[in-house]
Image (tube, rainbow, N blue to C red):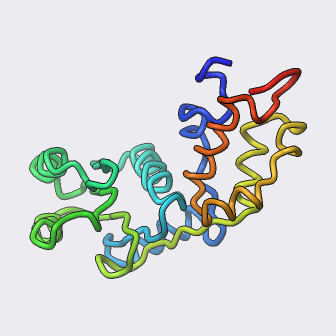
Amino acid sequence: MRARDNPFASHRLERLAYRFLTGSWLELRDRLASLGGRGAIVGPDGSGKTTLLEQLARRLAADGIPVALVGAEPERGPRRDVLGAALRSAGPETHLLVDGADALAPGEWRRLERDSRRLAALVVTSHRDGLLPALHRTTTSAGLLAELVAELTEESVAARIDAAAIYRQHDGDLRAALRALYDRCAVGAIEVGDGPC
C-alpha cells in the first residue's frame, strides 16, 4: 500500500473536524467575546488544540474577520519570525491565533501580550493554565478515538481495531494513537479490504 492510501495518512487526518466533547462553536465564540477577545485553548498533548485553533481561524476568515495564524514547530513553539511579522502587519480588527504559546520564553510572552493589546483578539494554545483565561479545554476519550477510526476506515476495519486499548497505550494522546495506527497499517498489521493496509 502506498503511504498516501493509508487510512491514517496525515492528509486524511487534517480533514477531520474538531469534535467538542463539551461546548460548541457558538459557545466558543460567545466565550471569546465575554473574555474581551483574549483566551487560551488548554489541554494535554494530542487533545486537539491545534486542530481547534486552525478550524477557528478558518471559521473567522469565512466570516470576513481578519486572522493571523501562527503555527508551532514541534518542541519549539511558535515560529518567532512568523509571529513578529504577524504582529507588525496586523490591524486593529485582526484576531491573532498563536499555537504553542507556552513554549515562548517569559520575555517573549510579555512582548506578545503587550503588542497584541491593540488587536481585536489573541487566542493561544497551551498545555497549562495561566497564560490567558481558559477559552476552551480540550479533552479526549476512547470513544472519540473510536469515532475517528470509524470515520477514517471502512466499518469492517474499524470493528477490528480495539480503540480503547490503543487509547490507553498512548495515555489519551489521540495524535500518538493515530500515528501508531498509521504505523500498524504501514506494516500490514491491520487488514483493509481484501488484504493488509
Please name whichever residue, 174 or 14, is drawn nearer the observer in this view of the structure.
Answer: 174
Left/right placement of residue 70 relative to residue 185 reads left
Q: Is residue 143 visible?
A: yes
Q: Is residue 67 visible?
A: no
148 w.r.t. 108: above or below: above
Q: Is the C terminus in the top left, top right, bottom left or bottom right quadrant?
A: top right
Residue 123: where, in percent of width, then height? Answer: 33, 64
Q: Quadrant of residue 12?
A: top right
Residue 30: where, in percent of width, then height? Answer: 48, 71
Question: What residue appears at the point 88 percent right and 45 percent down from the top-left corner?
Answer: 159
Residue 112: where, in percent of width, then height? Answer: 15, 65
Question: What residue appears at the point 15 percent right and 73 percent down from the top-left corner?
Answer: 106
Q: Is the N terminus in the top left, top right, bottom left or bottom right quadrant?
A: top right
Q: Quadrant of residue 3?
A: top right
Residue 27: where, in percent of width, then height? Answer: 55, 70
Q: What count of labels does the image hold?
A: 0
Question: What residue appears at the point 55 percent right and 51 percent down from the top-left corner?
Answer: 175
Left/right placement of residue 156 relative to residue 192 reads right
Please name whichever residue, 17 or 102, is drawn nearer the observer in this view of the structure.
Answer: 102
Please name whichever residue, 60 or 14, is drawn nearer the observer in this view of the structure.
Answer: 14
115 w.r.t. 90: above or below: below
